[in-house]
Image: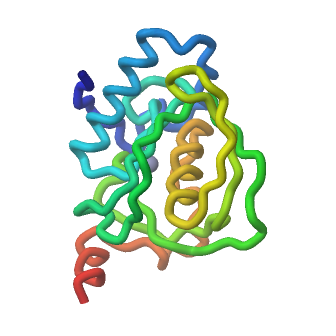
Amino acid sequence: MGRVLEIAQLGHPVLRKIAEPVAEIDENIQQLIDDLFATSEAANGAGIAAPQVNVSSRVFILTIKPSPRYPDAPEVEPTAVINPEILWVSDNTVKDWEGCLSVPGIRGKVPRPDAIRVRYQTRKGDTMEREFAGFAARVFLHEHDHLEGLTWLDHVEDNRDIVSEQEFMRALLD
Ligand code: ZN
């Protein structure tokens, strides 16, 4: 069973470290993945990366579905991603809203490629190659950033693209 863990907040040094590759998908990694799923679900996240729960390993999960935080999200099957590589990104970029469980209270418009091809290991140890587009590509790249010590704030082009969560939600309801 997954445990709901405390989420590291912006300013915690673990969020700025380059995460270590996973050498062996052992019991600890399986428990970590279960904990990441439980933690992201409890917080209505679209995904969460291991550094966000203070584990500097190259692991993240995607929990992409409509939720109170992301009412317009598509539905993607829950996915655990280990040792990801970005193989290709589209030239076409799209600027759209992001938030982060480690950056509470604000949302921002972030430019990202709108399609990507990636390779990663599953929790069973299989190597997968997949393409993601739209919001799923955005979440994948956002979580991948956490393994590189980056947050969405590092991609914002203009401070005016940052808003409070309250104003963001108000605009959604308009
Ligand atoms: Zn994040």
Q: Quadrant of residue 32?
A: top left
**x then y, percent, for residue 71:** 29, 68
Image vertical order of residue 26 relative to residue 76, above or below: above
Q: Quadrant of the N terminus?
A: top left
Q: Which residue does the image show at 60% across and 63% down from the upper left?
A: 133
Q: Quadrant of the C terminus?
A: bottom left
Q: Quadrant of residue 20?
A: top right
Image vertical order of residue 26 relative to residue 167, above or below: above
Q: Which residue does the image show at 37% across and 73% down from the upper left?
A: 163
Which residue occupies the foreground of this view, 73 or 58?
73
Which residue occupies the foreground of this view, 50 or 120?
120
Image vertical order of residue 88 relative to residue 70, above or below: above
Q: How many marks?
A: 0
How are the residues colored?
Answer: rainbow
Q: Which residue does the image show at 55% across and 29% down from the upper left?
A: 122
Q: Is residue 84 left or right of residue 171?
A: right
**x then y, percent, for residue 23:** 63, 13
**x then y, percent, for residue 76:** 43, 53
Q: Is residue 59 left or right of residue 46?
A: right
Q: Which residue does the image show at 39% across and 59% down from the upper left?
A: 75
Which residue occupies the foreground of this view, 93 or 51?
93
